[in-house]
Image (spheres, helix red, strand yellow):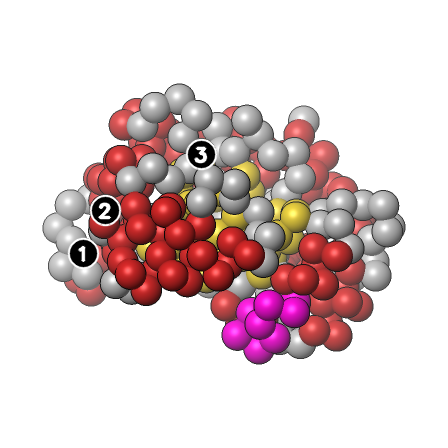
Amino acid sequence: MQEERPIIALDFATFEEVKDFLNHFPKAEMLYLKIGMELYYAHGPQVVSYVKSQGHSVFLDLKLHDIPNTVQATMAVLAKLGVDMTTVHAAGGLEMMAAARKGLGFGPKLMAVTQLTSTSEQQMQKEQLIQASLGESVQHYAQLTQQAGLDGVVCSAQEVGLIKEVTPEGFLCLTPGIRPQGVAIGDQKRVMTPAQARAIGSHFIVVGRPITQASDPLAAYEMIRAEWNA
């Protein structure tokens, strides 16, 4: 199951920027949009409600990481917003992830973040004191995520093949850090093009600045969507 729409990261600080950006697209274009921490903490549920009212799908990427009871209660609140997908940190552990699934229910997709795409293996080993390789860490988190009953993981496209080795068919991989050929990678360290992500088996891709900062966001989106679905 590959989602044909690239998920657009709405990395904006204000509600007006979101509305201005969406005005670049035809009203009939039903998008898949990521609302992250900056936008959600600034405007709360109203930004989710607005995006849903326009007919778009919402990936609410809050990466919850807390004690199980708190995460379960929070997920129950997010479920009422009608989000289509949301996230926790796999580092929260098996019990926390299972509690998140219980709170959210089985309608929206629930994904766990393995290692951030801004994290290198050297950083992980030095700062997190994880002495395994980055690939082994990601595989371990993916297995825990599957055991907890979640739908899949957020990971670098470079780790999708490793994850497929240790998880059953149908376990989903969502890959941020997607950059078309020739576009600056910014603060991401593990990136791939849309075509590469498709070839390796990603189910969802997230693209931000190459679309949101483009002079013609619609044209940039259509180019990336065409490459992703080629």
Say which amino acid is labelled 3: Leu
What residue appears at the point 38 percent right and 46 percent down from the top-left corner? 101
Residue 12 in the image, given as x and y percentages of width and height? 63, 70
Marks 1 and 3: which is nearer the front?
3
Dominant secondary structure (helix, strand or loop) of the stretch shown in magenta: helix
Q: Give the magenta range.
A: 40-47
| First in residue order: circle 1 vs circle 3 | 1
How many discs appear?
3
Q: Name the element at disc 1.
A: helix
Look at the numbered discs 1 and 2 and tell me whether their residues touch, using CB distance below 8 Å: no
Instruction: Give the spatial CA distance, label 3 vs label 2.
Output: 18 Å
User: Which label lies toward us, 1 or 2?
Assistant: 2
Disc number placed over residue 94 in the picture, else none: 2
Q: Quadrant of residue 181?
A: top right
Q: Residue 128 appears at what percent x and percent y?
A: 19, 61
Counting residues from the N terminus, which is met first, the one under dot 1 or under dot 2? 2
Label placed on residue 172: 3
Along the line of sight, which residue is nearer the eye, 221 or 203?
Answer: 203
Q: Earlier in the sequence, mark 3 or mark 2?
A: 2
Q: Callout 1, which amino acid?
A: Gln
**Secondary element at image label 3:** strand
Judge from the rendering whether residue 87 lies leftward or rightward of residue 182; answer left or right: left
Between circles 3 and 2, the one closer to the viewer is 2
